[in-house]
Image (cartoon, grey):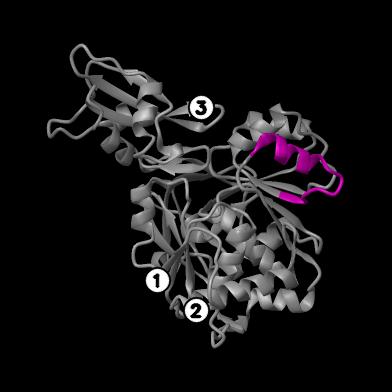
Amino acid sequence: MLVDAWLTRAAAATPHAPAVNNLSYAELLRESSRAARQLSALGVQPGDRVGIVLVPGVEFVIALHGVLLLGAVAVPVDPASAAPQIAERTRGARTVIDGPLTGHEDPAAVLVEKHDLDAVAVVIFSSGSTGAGKAVELTYGNFWWSAAGSAVALGLNPSERWLCCLPLSHVGGLSIVIRSAIYGTEAVVHERFDSERVLTALQSPDGPTIVSLVPTTLNRLLEAGLANATSLRWVLLGGGPISDQLLQAASSASIPVAPSYGMSEACSQIFTRGAPLFCTRVELGEDDEILVSGPTVAPQCRPTLHTGDLGRLADSGALEVVGRLSDLIISGGENVSPETVEAVVALHPAVADVAVVGRADEEWGQKVTAVVVLEPEMTLSAEDLNEFCSSRLSPHERPKAVEVRDSLGRSAAGKLRRRDL
């Protein structure tokens, strides 16, 4: 099924409406078309993958739409990631955008007028349920149905201003930019989460109408004094466990919260405010694992997405997430593979054995913790380990605490009994 190209359609309908930060839709289309012609001059063809290693902001959005206008596939990667991870995730890309696009424009470049809903638009890297860092291919149809389902769940204001202070290399942040283009509404993109800047924006009388946050960042904003944000319709809250205390604190501050649960493999939201998106089917399978199907699910995960999360139905009929089948750690809304962190910590000369676990934490949801057995007469602090890991792991993967033990529980075959820790 073909649909009008989203950015082109929005620019034709409301050329002077704000699109992203200080750019109107007409300006965004002009700049993105220029970027598309520059990419074409670099040899990018429809279907080619293009790495985008840029901080969130206008240049990222221009690059993203430039890639899509060529019919190429965008591969966003967090520039704060470790260099080996960036190299691995951009392997096979025709080119990598890691700075402003300059140079020759191809006057013969053919820009798409339609999007094929079955075609791959974006490749997102997700830890998923295993932490393996797999590539998830999301189609135009995945994004279209996700945007439609989100609009039904949250309502849609024609003057929507959706604040994004999440990484655009993650589906939660990237979806804001894409669904705003589908709606023809405004995306306000911050380079990173900064409590003071976000608080100022939300407290403004003409501030954002929706903001996407994780529990850690909402808690920081409430502690900083967020209350009675008159323009704010919803805080879309997800990315980790949401405590009753946090929801009560938000309610006391008159901050409307829409709890949400989602995954990269389902193009962001699966259920919001306790109910699945209208286009999404959610069931409880064996061991009460949450199973998802529908048009937001990436083709490679169809017909049924096994989330690896455990759910239950509340008395109200709302679906709740109560745990995980796997050992994956979710810290500050980021997925962390304990095996990945263990492989790096084990390289430290003071470490004889290591297990990495998630400890319950009010700020982070789960705190990445290294449980270590030390070599004789050696010591190791959290600060020392963080410095050791700084060039080998991304910031969210680095252990925030160290626990020293005489031994780790292992099976007769030597397999770590992580859950015992």
What separation in Å lies between label 3 and label 1 (alpha carbons)? 42 Å
**Vertically, is 258 above or below 266?**
above
Where is mark 1, residue-wise?
94
Where is mark 3, residue-wise?
361
Q: Which image quarter holds the N terminus?
A: bottom right
Mark 3 or mark 2, whichever is nearer to me: 2
Q: Secondary structure at mark 1?
A: loop
Question: In which quadrant of the rendered view does residue 94 lie?
Answer: bottom left
In the picture, measured across the screen, residue 181 lies left or right of residue 48, that is right
Within 10 Å of the Cα at label 1, are there few (<14), some (14-19), or many (20+) other Cα atoms?
some
The segment highlighted magenta reads: 194-210
What separation in Å lies between label 1 and label 2 (alpha carbons)? 11 Å
In the rendered image, residue 34 lying in the magenta stretch gets the answer no
Ranked by sequence position, the earlier of labels 1 and 2 is: 2
Question: In which quadrant of the rendered view does residue 105 lie?
Answer: bottom right
- State the residue in front, 293 or 190: 190
x then y, percent, for residue 74: 49, 67
Q: Which image quarter holds the C terminus?
A: top left
**Vertically, is 373 above or below 357?**
above
Q: Are marks 3 and 2 in contact (CB under 8 Å)?
A: no
Q: What amino acid is at disc 3? A: Asp
Ranked by sequence position, the earlier of labels 3 and 1 is: 1
